[in-house]
Amino acid sequence: PPFRLPLSDQPIYTTRAHVFQIDPTTKKNWVPASKQAVTVSYFYDSTRNSYRIISVDGSKVIINSTITPNMTFTKTSQKFGQWADSRANTVFGLGFSSEQQLAKFAEKFQEVKEAAKLAREKSQEKGETMSNHSQESGHEMPSANQASSINGTDDEKISHVGPEAAVLKTENEHLKSVVEQSNTNAKKWETELQALRDNNARLVDALQESSSNVESWKKQLTVCKEESDALRGKIAELEAQCNEADQEKQGNTQLRVRVQELEAELQDKEQELENLRKQAEIIPQLMAECESVTTKLQVSLGLFSGRMQHIETELKDESFITVPEGW
């Protein structure tokens, strides 16, 4: 049967997700039903008193699932959920961009399932009431038919059909207005969908531009890293040179101290040399004085020797003059 949009003006809840269906052959693998994330909405169909999950990709209907009380939405991962639709003889899967979106969709699924359960119970109660009313009307019908058969007039038959035709006409007018409203909503959704596609296109362009910028930044980062490594090497080289310079500075300091020590020693030696020079200048005078003293000593010694000889001679002469007694 052709797809009809739900008769409610606004969706109960709308989100975006990637749509999948179970492979009908293997019943194991997932087959993508949309090339990208599409709008997935909960609707209330007032004409059928039912709730549906509907998703349209362009002009293609990829989900039209009527929710029943015995359906279950199962989270199979952090961002993926699924439910089985026995009427469509398939299993639908939705992939969301975040855990929050999946949790919200599952929460709405449970709420709508409860609403579908209440709607079914009300429909059953209404059906039972209508059945009882029909049975009561059925008991009264023979008398009306008998009256019709007795009178045999077509006006009375038309009077019985007239209210039903009026009801049908009213329903048809209501359906026409609802369809017109649905068409208006469909055009509005198409406009919004086109706006979303345009936004997606701009986002894709921005993403591509960002990717290009990221690649450029990566290259710049690589160049900066290489320059940083080169600078680190240069710094290490300069530090090594500074260490060598410090060592040379320490060596120069030691040499400077040694030079100062040598200069002090040299000054001491020069002072000693100066003293020796002064001493050398007085040596001739001292030698002359020594020679003079030597000469005087020799003269004195000669005089002393002569005197000693004279004394010895006198002593000898006296020995011959005096003779001890008894000899």
Image (cartoon, rainbow, N blue to C red):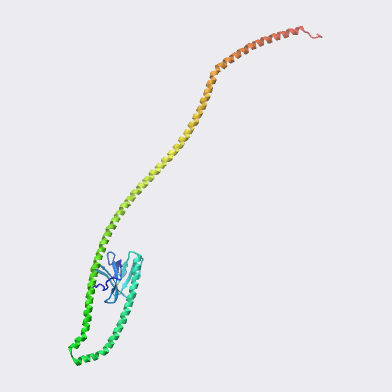
Q: Is residue 113 left or right of residue 321?
A: left
**Number of numbered discs on residues:** 0
Q: Horizontal and vertical percent for residue 323?
A: 78, 8
Q: Is residue 266 above or below residue 75?
A: above
Q: From the top left corner, tell me how far across and down residue 297 is, in percent.
A: 63, 13
Q: Residue at x 35, y 70 (%)?
A: 107
Please tell me which residue is depicted at 26% across the width and 90% down the height of the picture.
Answer: 140
Who's the residue at 32% across and 79% down the image? 122
Q: Residue furthest bottom?
A: 150
Query: Looking at the figure, which quarter contains the N terminus?
Result: bottom left
Determine which quarter of the picture holds residue 90. Answer: bottom left
- Quadrant of residue 245 in the image? top left
Question: Does the image show residue 234?
Answer: yes
User: Is residue 193 placed above or below 326 in the rendered structure?
Assistant: below
Q: Residue at the far left: name it.
A: 154
Q: Relative to the observer, which residue lies in front, 178 or 60? A: 178
Query: Is 263 on the left-hand or right-hand side of 139?
Result: right
Residue 137 location, x and y as percent? 27, 88
Q: Which corner quadrant of the image does residue 211 belong to?
A: bottom left
Q: Residue at x 35, y 46 (%)?
A: 227
Which percent across, then down, holds residue 94?
31, 67
For the C terminus, give its image quadrant. Answer: top right
Left or right position of 256 against 211? right
* Residue 72 visible in this rendered orientation of the protein: no
In the picture, measured across the screen, residue 102 lies left or right of residue 287, that is left
